[in-house]
Every structure is written in C-alpha cells, then in structure tokens.
C-alpha cells in the first residue's frame, strides 16, 4: 500500500550545539501529538524560518533514539541552509516531515552487522548504535569509519563511549594522519583487503550498511560484490540525492511529486479551457451552418444561372454538385509603409 507522508510535524529547538563544523540540533515536539514516530537509521526533512522567509526543506539522518522523545540531527555546516541552522535559538519553530528511508536494522534478518561510514555519513549509524546500547541488544557490530583527518572525526568521543558501553561493538577509525598511539586508529583508507577480511570467517553472512560520499559508497559496494556478498545483504544510504526525499513507501520524491502534480493540474486546466471554448464555438458554428444552408436553400432555385455564369465567389463540389461556402478571405491589409 502506498502511504504518502506529507504531514508537517511541528517541533521547536531544544538545544543547538556546534562542535567544530558539526552542528547538533535537538528538537522537541511543540505539542505531544506532533511527535514523529521513527525507526533508528531513518531520516527527516526539516525547514524553518530565516527572518520572515521559510527555508527549503533539507534532509538529515536522525541521530536520536525513538524513546528519547527528541529529534536530533548532526549537520556538517557547509552552505546557506546549515549556516542558517546555526542561528536557530531554543524555542524557535522547525517544520519536520518524515520519517523517510529504509536504512534500518531488521533484527530478525540481520544477525551480524558491518557498518561502513565516511565523513558525515556516520550520522545514521549513531542513531542505530545509541539504540543498540540503550536496549542492550547482543548484536555483533563492526564499524569502520573513514575520515581525512584524525582531528576531524564527527562523533569521535561518543563513538568511543558507545564502544565502552557495548561489548558487541568493534570500532576502527581510518584516517590519513592516524595517530597510532590512539586506540582503534588505522592509518590510511579502507582497502579491499579489509573488506575481504570482513566477508570471511565469522563475519560471513553479515549485513553490510554503507553511508558516505559517492566514491566511498561505490568503492565499498564493488569490494563487497567481489567478495560475493549477496545484494540483499548490502544496504546503502546516499546523502547526495536531494531528490531522494521519498514520500513514504511510494517511492515518489518531493520533486517528482511536484512535477507530477503540476503536469496533472496543467492538463486539467487545459481540458477545462478547451471545454469552455468548445461550449462557445460549437453553437456558433452550428448557427453559421444553419444560416448557410438556409441561404443555399433560398438561392437554390435562382442560383443555377449564377452557377453557369461562373461566379468566381462560388465553389461547387464536383462530386455532389452542392455549393460550399467560399473560403474566408484575409480582410486584414497590413498598413503600407512609405519611405519618403
Ligand atoms: C537521506 C539524506 C540524509 C542526509 N543526512 C545528513 C546528515 O545527517 N548530516 C548532514 O550534514 N547532511 C546530511 N544530508 C545532506 C544534506 O541534506 C545536505 O548536504 C545539506 O542540506 C546541505 O546543506 P548546505 O547548508 O550545505 O547547503 P544548501 O545551502 O542547502 O545548498 C547548497 C547547494 O547544494 C545543493 N544541495 C543541498 N543538499 C544537497 C544534496 N543532498 N545533494 C546534492 N545537492 C545538494 C543545493 O541545491 C544548493 O545548490 C543528507 C541528505 C540526504 C539525502
């Protein structure tokens, strides 16, 4: 069944905290019935007012857990939208649409998990890892996070803390300038060799979740397929497609829904205008035709002479011998411009 989730949930800012270039935005429902129900790993589209103007809606993975009662997002501050979000104050209203996406755990199917993240692509995993720790679920998880720099790892401290709380979580940070004395740090990027290891031995049969840059995601998928991981075991999330705001389970994006609705409205409008025009023109045509045939009937008896006289204004059908109305003449004469 197709469910179209266009409901706007009204939230207000509870807290806004910026750590380096990451903004942690925490929202609470304006009223209890505005609360949005979601599953860890899903995302929502949010928008607010910048002065008097509403901003566009932008998508962000939810980093909070369903039981926390709040909605939290971790945003990398880059462009106009995220810069405007840093100016939000506690109590400011925020529109929330969603939840969207199926980058979620299936606890009956996923018995062992490998999470592959790069950069800000860590956010949907934060929601899942907080949930597993909160519920103390004995689900073995291996998380590999790739970042350019060791000083630029979003949620670094929290990930270490989650690994301390959850004995089933193994954590590895891959960085170009990794400090080997820091636990869980690996120099360089995630290679095919690492993936091969994650597809063999006790890791066999894992479900692989990927979220990160386009290149990263492509590389990870290729490596997994080379290691014969079944498609149903590869689950990916993309941050790059703005049009990937799926409306519920229909697979429709906000953009395609807008285009679709506009096209249908235009079609309906042109149909309406055509019907109006036909309503005006058809009676006039019928009236003209009736007038023409009555003129023909009146002329019928006396027109034989004029037919034979070869009047240039009268057309006679060679098949039926009936007169037809002459073709309209273009009476409009363009003004003749004279050059003196
Ligand atoms: C499912 C999903 C989940 C996401 N989760 C997160 C998250 O947890 N944290 C996070 O930091 N980011 C996330 N993103 C990406 C985020 O939505 C955009 O990167 C963000 O809106 C960009 O905001 P901005 O202030 O940098 O740029 P804006 O001022 O919003 O836009 C700058 C330019 O970038 C374009 N643009 C904006 N967003 C995108 C996009 N996603 N793809 C391509 N072009 C875009 C705009 O059209 C505009 O031309 C997610 C995206 C998706 C689709």
Image (cartoon, helix red, strand yellow):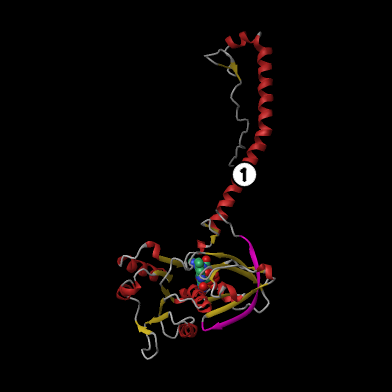
Quarter of the view holding residue 180: bottom left
| Residue under the point 39% across and 65% down | 233
Q: Nearer the viewer, residue 47 or 203?
A: 203
Up the image or down, 315 lies above or below 15; here it is above
- Main structural element of the magenta stretch: helix, strand or loop? strand
Is 9 included in the stretch rendered in magenta?
Answer: yes
Q: Nearer the viewer, residue 298 or 216?
A: 216
Q: Nearer the viewer, residue 237 or 297?
A: 237
- State whether residue 84 appears in this view: no
Find residue 255 and report its horizontal and vertical position in percent. 54, 58
Quarter of the view holding residue 248: bottom right
> Crowding near pointer 1: few (<14 within 10 Å), some, many (20+)?
few
Q: Is residue 12 left or right of residue 74?
A: right
Q: Secondary structure at mark 1?
A: helix
Is 217 included in the stretch rendered in magenta?
Answer: no
- Which quadrant is the C terminus positioned in? top right
Q: Is residue 247 left or right of residue 120?
A: right
| Residue under the point 66% across and 27% down | 285
Up the image or down, 117 lies above or below 337; here it is below
Residue placed under numbered mark 1 in the picture = 268
Q: Nearer the viewer, residue 235 or 105?
A: 105
Q: Mark 1: is the Cβ under 8 angstroms from ligand 1?
A: no
Find residue 244 and report its horizontal and vertical position in percent. 50, 62
Looking at the rendering, the stretch of residues picked out in magenta corresponds to 6-20
Find residue 229 and report its horizontal and vertical position in percent. 34, 65
Q: Identify the residue at the far bottom of this view.
A: 181
Q: Is residue 328 left or right of residue 243?
A: right
């Amino acid at each position: 069944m197709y469910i179209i989730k266009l409901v706007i949930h009204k939230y207000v800012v509870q807290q806004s905290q910026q750590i380096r270039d990451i903004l942690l935005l925490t929202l609470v429902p304006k009223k209890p019935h505005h609360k949005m129900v979601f599953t860890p790993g899903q995302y929502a589209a949010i928008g607010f007012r910048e002065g008097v103007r509403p901003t566009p809606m932008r998508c962000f993975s939810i980093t909070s857990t369903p039981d926390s009662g709040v909605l939290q997002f971790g945003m990398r501050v880059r462009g106009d939208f995220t810069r405007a979000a840093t100016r939000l104050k506690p109590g400011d209203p925020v529109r929330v649409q969603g939840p969207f996406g199926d980058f979620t755990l299936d606890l009956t199917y996923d018995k062992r998990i490998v999470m592959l993240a790069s950069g800000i692509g860590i956010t949907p995993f934060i929601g899942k890892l907080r949930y597993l720790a909160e519920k103390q679920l004995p689900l073995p998880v291996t998380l590999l996070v790739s970042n350019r720099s060791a000083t630029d790892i979003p949620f670094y401290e929290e990930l270490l803390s989650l690994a301390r709380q959850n004995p089933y979580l193994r954590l590895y940070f891959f960085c170009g300038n990794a400090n080997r004395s820091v636990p869980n740090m690996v120099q360089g990027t995630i290679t095919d060799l690492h993936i091969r290891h994650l597809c063999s031995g006790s890791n066999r049969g894992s479900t692989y979740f990927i979220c990160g840059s386009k290149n990263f995601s492509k590389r990870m998928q290729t490596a997994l397929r080379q290691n014969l991981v079944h498609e149903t075991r590869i689950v990916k999330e993309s941050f790059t497609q703005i049009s990937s705001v799926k409306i519920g389970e229909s697979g429709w994006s906000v953009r395609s829904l807008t285009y679709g609705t506009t096209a249908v409205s235009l079609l309906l409008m042109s149909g309406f205008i055509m019907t109006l025009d036909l309503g005006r023109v058809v009676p006039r045509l019928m009236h003209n035709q009736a007038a023409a045939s009555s003129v023909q009937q009146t002329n019928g008896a006396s027109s034989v002479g004029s037919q034979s006289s070869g009047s240039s204004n009268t057309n006679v059908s060679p098949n039926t011998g009936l007169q037809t109305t002459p073709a309209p003449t273009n009476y409009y004469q363009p003004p003749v411009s004279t050059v003196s």
